[in-house]
């Protein structure tokens, strides 16, 4: 930024040669573009890192949710089997009067 401010001094009556002012204009453009490229690269790099981190967090939550759903379905399946066995033992007890083996 200091380079651009130095160049602005060259556009005052301090510099009387118009040809030098003309070339200093190109120099100002070069420094402004360089400044923009550096700043945009910093912004894009940080945005990329933030986006990558967000994706990793989302993917981790998604896989954890899948395993949680699978675990819950396994639990429900085991619970249903246990209920079915209890019903069968209860029905057998009413039919025969024998107590189930525990």
Image (cartoon, rainbow, N blue to C red):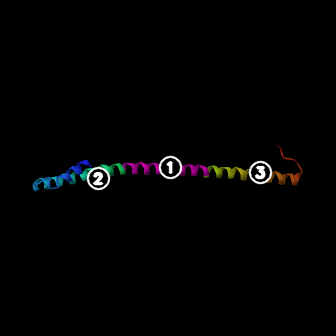
6 sits left or right of 39 in the view: left
In the rendered structure, does residue 72 fall within the stretch colored magenta?
A: no
Q: Residues within 10 Å of mark 1 (few under 14, many from 20)?
A: few
Q: Which residues are magenta?
A: 44-68
Task: Say which residue appears at 57% left-offset and 51% top-offset.
Answer: 65
Question: Nearer the viewer's eye, disc 2 or disc 1?
Answer: 2
Question: Given the current orientation, which residue lies at the most extreme front position?
Answer: 13
Of the image marks 2 and 1, the number of the one nearer the N terminus: 2
Where does the image place residue 100, in percent across and percent down from the top left? 84, 46
Q: Secondary structure at mark 2?
A: helix
Mark 3–mark 1 distance (CA, rounded to whole Å): 42 Å
> Mark 3 = which residue?
85
Q: Which residue is mark 2?
A: 36
Viewer-side residue, 52 vs 12: 12
Main SS, magenta residues: helix
Query: Residue 8 at what x, y percent from top left?
Result: 20, 53
Q: Which residue is mark 1?
A: 57
Q: Nearer the viewer, mark 2 or mark 3?
A: 2
Rendered residue at 12%/53% (across/down): 20
Instruction: Count neighbours of disc 2 (C-alpha within 10 A) and say few if under 14, some if 14 to 19, many if 20 or more.
Output: few
Q: Earlier in the sequence, mark 2 or mark 3?
A: 2
Between discs 3 and 1, the one toward the N terminus: 1
Residue located 79% across and 51% down the image? 86
Q: Evaluate if marks 3 and 1 touch, with contact meaning CB atoms under 8 Å apart.
A: no
SS at circle 1: helix
Badge 3: few (under 14), some or many (20 or more) residues near its Cα, within 10 Å? few
């Amino acid at each position: 930024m200091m380079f651009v401010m130095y160049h602005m001094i060259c556009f005052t009556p301090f510099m009387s040669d118009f040809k030098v002012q003309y070339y200093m204009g190109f120099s100002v453009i070069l420094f402004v573009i360089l400044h923009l490229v550096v700043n945009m690269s910093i912004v894009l790099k940080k945005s990329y890192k933030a986006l990558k981190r967000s994706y990793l967090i989302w993917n981790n939550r998604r896989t954890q949710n899948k395993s949680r759903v699978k675990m819950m379905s396994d639990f429900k399946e085991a619970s249903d089997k246990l209920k079915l066995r209890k019903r069968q033992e209860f029905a057998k007890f009413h039919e025969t009067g024998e107590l189930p083996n525990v």
